[in-house]
Image (cartoon, rainbow, N blue to C red):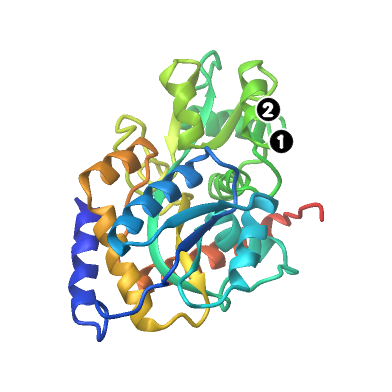
Amino acid sequence: MQRRLFAGAALAAGLGATGVFGQTMPRSAVRIVVGFPPGGGTDVLARLLGQKLGATWGIPVFVDNRAGAAGIIAAEQVARAEPDGATLLMAHINSHGIAPGLQPGLPYSAERDFTPIALVGATPQMLICASDQPVRTLDGLVALCRSQPGKIVFGSAGNGSAQHLALELFKARAGIDVLHVPYKGSTPLVTDMLGGHVQYSFEGMTTAAQYLGGGKMTAIAQTRLRRSRSFPAVPTLAESGFDGFEASIWFGLVGPARMPPALVARMNKDVNTVLAMPDVIARLDQFGAEDGGGSAQRFGDFMHAEREKWARIIKTAQITVDR
């Protein structure tokens, strides 16, 4: 399993790092800030990670939900924290991949104000439609959009959301024009899709799975390079003529800038150990979260590449958000 391979590699690297095991951890508690309300996928996985890390470190590790502005409020708070390891952030594609290209006036620099620790996981988005839609194949959908430019209705969870940007990437790669209708979140979007007001959308796998399992929705394609183990029968866009198409929703652990390297190495090693635990793997699989772990450098490089990719899409599609 790839996750275990990453974990093993990071462990080997950690063993050679000076002072990894002797690095002083925060004495009282560690706070993992989450930029979304309790109960969502990011929150649930942060709590699972915190529970396991708390047992490893022998100190309380608790989740602090600071919801608002698609994770920006939480990110700003952690950017201003002391770099002693006591305050961490479950970074998300919104705050660390999309927002830097979407909102030039961010109160933090995703590049300079954080220390990458470890990627926790990446989940696919699903290109979905209500099961009574007459066109439910990728080739058929592209042909339909080309035959009716600007008329086929795609919804998203909001202007500038990960779902919206997946749509813009799809439009650019397929050479199609559609009508984009942004909603304030996934719940009203799915309601209107089931009601026939919206024909298609990209949606995070965690949200889409509950409708796909009940037969109300059909998955046309998924957006990671490889098929999710949770949906092995759904083809990826990358294997369906859109080579290299990748639009995942991801999250990982970061801290404030200037954390001591030995402390980062210790935390990275321990996160990798947690991600290799069978019960954690099973929980991550429920969310479709794969490919977590590896070095802090790997996560930093990944976030940098994501920022560059989405900034290009935002600029080309001229996406703006209300401020």
Q: Is residue 138 above or below residue 268?
A: above
In the rendered view of the protein, which quadrant contains the C terminus?
Answer: bottom right
Say which mark, if any, is on residue 183: 1
Point 54% across, 24% down: residue: 129
| Direction right: furthest residue | 323
Q: Amino acid at mark 1?
A: Tyr
Q: Can residue 292 be seen by looking at this rendering?
A: no
Q: Position of residue 62 (x, y in %)?
A: 47, 54
Q: Position of residue 193 (x, y in %)?
A: 63, 22
Point 52% across, 37% down: residue: 39
Q: In this view of the protein, which residue sits in the foreground, 132 or 87?
A: 87
Q: CA separation, marks 2 and 1?
A: 7 Å
**Left or right, 181 with reference to 263:** right
Callouts 2 and 1 close, C-beta under 8 Å: yes
Helix, strand or loop for disc 1 = loop
Q: Amino acid at mark 2?
A: Pro
Q: Can residue 173 be seen by looking at this rendering?
A: yes
Point 54% across, 34% down: residue: 142
Query: Of label 2 and label 1, which has the lower sequence position?
Result: 1
Q: Is residue 244 above or below residue 41?
A: below
Kindly identify which residue carries mark 2.
Answer: 188
Q: Position of residue 152 (x, y in %)?
A: 67, 29
Point 61% across, 17% down: residue: 194
| Residue 201 sits in quarter | top right
Q: In this view of the protein, which residue sits in the foreground, 64 or 26?
A: 26
Q: Position of residue 206 (x, y in %)?
A: 46, 35
Q: Residues within 10 Å of mark 1 (few under 14, many from 20)?
A: some
Helix, strand or loop for disc 2 = helix
| Residue 113 sits in quarter | bottom right
Number of marks present in the image shown: 2
